[in-house]
Amino acid sequence: MNVSDAAYDTVHQHPGGSVALAPRMGMSDATLRGKVNPNTDRNLLSLQEADTLMGKTGDFRILHALAATHGFVAQRVDAPASGTMICALLAASAAKGDLAEVISAAMADGQISPNDADQITRACAQVMAAIVQVSQHAEAAAARGGA
């Protein structure tokens, strides 16, 4: 997923969307929508605004997209809030299954369209995030001295 799509999804998939987020960001709904519109190159989201957006939403896909663009994977360093490593592993397996389904559907016609590629990229990001959760649970268990 590219940074523009990540910003768009962060705003539009947040409960209440841009209408709920804009006042918390100190701007109008229309301005926020414009700043995250991937089809425009004017009035873009600044680094400070992206940082504020991630802080207000708790959604870090912009950070992950930036990292992935430059060949890195960002990983949270604190312990997972809840759940177990087995639950995280099962969630990662489900995400991998979803990715396989997306790829299968994309390849059904023998061609990968730009939309197919975007869906595959998004599904890959979900798998990566789920795998990181498994790692976080392992780190937390090691810090506690148990499973």
Image: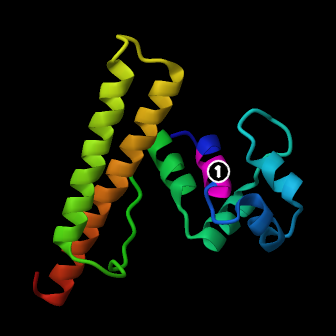
What residue is shown at x 61% (from left), y 65% (from top)? 54
* Residue 117 x %, y %: 45, 27
Tally the numbered discs.
1
* Residue 92 x %, y %: 25, 56
Q: Residue furthest left?
A: 146
Q: Is residue 72 magenta?
A: no
Of helix, strand and loop, which mostly describes the magenta segment?
Answer: helix
Residue 72 visible? The answer is no
Q: Which residues are magenta?
A: 6-12
| Secondary structure category for the residue under label 1 | helix
Tag 1: residue type? Ala
Tell whether 33 sits left or right of 114: right
What residue is shown at x 79% (from left), y 68% (from top)? 25
* Residue 142 x %, y %: 16, 80
Tell whether 8 sits left or right of 122: right
What residue is shown at x 26% (from left), y 45% (from top)? 96
Residue under circle 1? 7
Q: Residue furthest bottom?
A: 144
What residue is shown at x 27% (from left), y 78% (from top)? 83
